[in-house]
Amino acid sequence: MVNTQEAVRNARAHLAAEAGFSLVELLVAASVSLVVLGGAVVIAKQVQEGYGQQLETASAEQEARYALDWIQRLLRQAGSDPYSIRTSPCLPPGLLPSVNGFPPVMRDPNGNGVNDDIRIFADAGSPNALIGGPGPAPGGCTEANEDLTITHLAATREIAVRDNNQPALGTQIMTDDVISLLRFEYRDRNGAPTIDMGRLAWVRATVTAQARLRDPVTGQFPTFTVAVNVRLRPRW
């Protein structure tokens, strides 16, 4: 009888030892797991957002450099005049100085008082002593790449180019919608600012791109600015 009671007690003790966690222990373990899992999710989200923001910043920087590169190339051809052109029916009135030939550029062509656009002239598309072509007659002012307007579209944050001798092409968007600023500065051969296109020797182009995503640390949209000084062909 004693042995039987002892066996029952041992069985009960064995069952109690294998009973597992109590409800309180389960709740504590679940709470700790939730805290750890929540922290991991937050960290993973921050890492993902940071990576995405870095990609956007790099993309904006690349777009600014790309825009400045092709703007610089167009400015370097401005004023190309191998035949010393003194007259052309395809140029706007007032752009034919009798001594220096035609000015390479026109500042603020839309006349809004902001130097965020420029008009570039060059006998470059088809060098033939004509800017744009022989004139209004059939087959007139149609020579491409000789009268171009570069414009910043502030509303859409893009830079566009229009070939004024190819109106059928319309305005061509040249960048992604990340360009927050485009500016042109005009300087004479001494580096002094000038609005006299007859004394123009240098054009400084500045492009600023703004990333689409905020920096998770600062809360601001990162920006990247690049600039270049271009010496024009005419040396006044």
Image: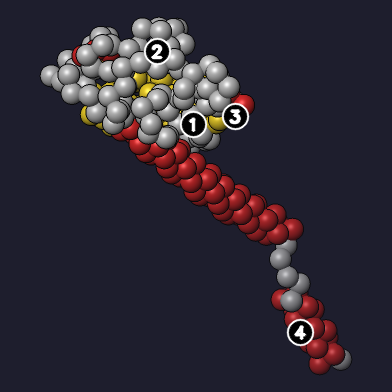
**Gap between marks 3 and 1 measured at Cα:** 10 Å
Residue receiving disc 4:
10
**Mark 4: which amino acid?**
Asn
Asked whether the residues under the numbered discs 4 and 3 touch, taking CB atoms below 8 Å apart as contact, a structural biologist would say no
Q: Position of residue 12 (x, y in %)?
A: 79, 79
**Mark 1: which amino acid?**
Ala
Give the label, 1 or 4, closer to the camera. 1
| Residue 144 image label | 1
Q: Secondary structure at mark 1?
A: loop
Q: Residue at x 24, y 28 (%)?
A: 233
Where the N terminus falls, by quadrant?
A: bottom right
* Mark 4 or mark 3: whose residue is earlier in sequence: 4
Query: Of residues 128 and 53, which is closer to you in this image?
Result: 128
Give the label, 1 or 2, closer to the camera. 1
Residue receiving disc 2:
108
* Mark 1 or mark 2: whose residue is earlier in sequence: 2
Q: Residue at x 42, y 35 (%)?
A: 126
Horizontal side of 197 relative to 147 (left or right) equals left
**Gap between marks 3 and 2 measured at Cα:** 22 Å
Query: Of residues 74 and 121, which is closer to you in this image?
Result: 121
